[in-house]
Image (tube, rainbow, N blue to C red):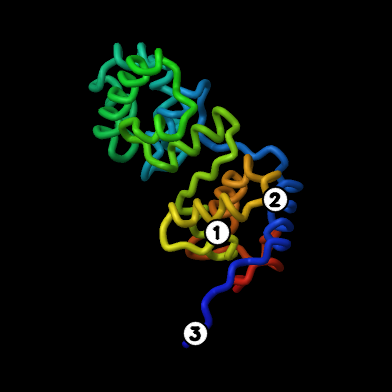
């Protein structure tokens, strides 16, 4: 029988994040926003779309509406017109209206800082809720997208069959001092270095610590 994959040792996990922190001390997400609300809308729009395409669409949208009140007043049809260049734009426009109405009605127009409350909003799942908490409110959460999932499994920092499983393991294994920025480092590493089809192992800052190096 093949030997089960072993999780990376804690000392090596520390070294990985220590290197990430030295290379990029203040990593940032690539979505453009001006407030917790516009961040929330941008992340909802980013499902199955690139950050670049979302930024192009929301640049126009946020000039017209950057608060729940203004977004509701703008209406679904006009929202769709502004974001029609991104995938699933009809459903996203519907979710933007619905979540704006809930934020206005239940939270006095303020984006909640609670995971469960965020997760319950239309068009918002675990990843979106964690992204908003982390970026807007500096809560040490880890949002697991396809890049984080891939890098975590390849490096064996966390081995899981689904994103929720990987998220739970990462929260236990990533050193606390690196938690606030951890998912940014993993996303950027997966997007630009540890790519899905052709990982750039020869240009990888952590290749000597990675058990999957080709």
| Residue at image point 58% right, 65% down | 156
What SS does tag 2 mark?
A: helix
Based on the displayed image, in which of its 4 quarters is residue 93 positioned? top left
Of 12 and 201, the residue lying toward us: 12
Of 32 and 173, the residue lying toward us: 173
- Relative to 145, 86 lies left or right: left
Nearer the camera: disc 1 or disc 3: 3
The residue sitting at the right extreme is: 22
Residue 2, disc: 3
Instruction: Identify the mark nearer the N-term, 3 or 2.
Output: 3
| Residue at image point 56% right, 37% down | 29
Residue 151, disc: 1
Question: Callout 1: 10 Å neighbours few (<14), some, many (20+)?
Answer: many
Question: Callout 2: 10 Å neighbours few (<14), some, many (20+)?
Answer: many
| Residue 12 position within the rendered picture, expressed as x and y whole percent measured from the top left | 71, 63
- Relative to 176, 141 lies left or right: left
Based on the displayed image, in which of its 4 quarters is residue 109 positioned? top left
Instruction: Identify the mark nearer the N-term, 1 or 3.
Output: 3
Q: Quadrant of the C terminus?
A: bottom right
> Does residue 176 show up?
yes
Of 186 and 62, the residue lying toward us: 186
What SS does tag 1 mark?
A: helix
């Amino acid at each position: 029988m093949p030997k089960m994959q072993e999780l990376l040792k804690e000392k090596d996990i520390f070294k990985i994040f220590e290197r990430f922190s030295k290379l990029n001390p203040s990593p940032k997400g690539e979505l453009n926003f001006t407030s917790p609300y516009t961040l929330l809308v941008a992340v909802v729009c980013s499902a199955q779309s690139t950050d670049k395409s979302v930024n192009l669409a929301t640049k126009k949208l946020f000039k017209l509406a950057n608060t729940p009140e203004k977004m509701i007043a703008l209406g679904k049809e006009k929202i769709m017109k502004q974001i029609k260049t991104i995938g699933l734009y009809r459903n996203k426009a519907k979710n933007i209206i619905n979540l704006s109405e809930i934020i206005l009605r239940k939270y006095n127009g303020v984006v909640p800082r609670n995971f469960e409350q965020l997760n319950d909003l239309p068009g918002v799942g675990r990843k979106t809720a964690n992204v908003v908490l982390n970026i807007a409110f500096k809560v040490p959460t880890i949002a697991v997208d396809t890049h984080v999932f891939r890098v975590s499994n390849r490096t064996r920092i966390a081995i899981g069959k689904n994103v929720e499983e990987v998220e739970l393991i990462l929260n236990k294994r990533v050193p606390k001092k690196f938690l606030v920025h951890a998912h940014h480092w993993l996303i950027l590493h997966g997007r630009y270095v540890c790519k899905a089809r052709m990982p750039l192992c020869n240009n990888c800052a952590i290749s000597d610590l990675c058990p999957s190096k080709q």
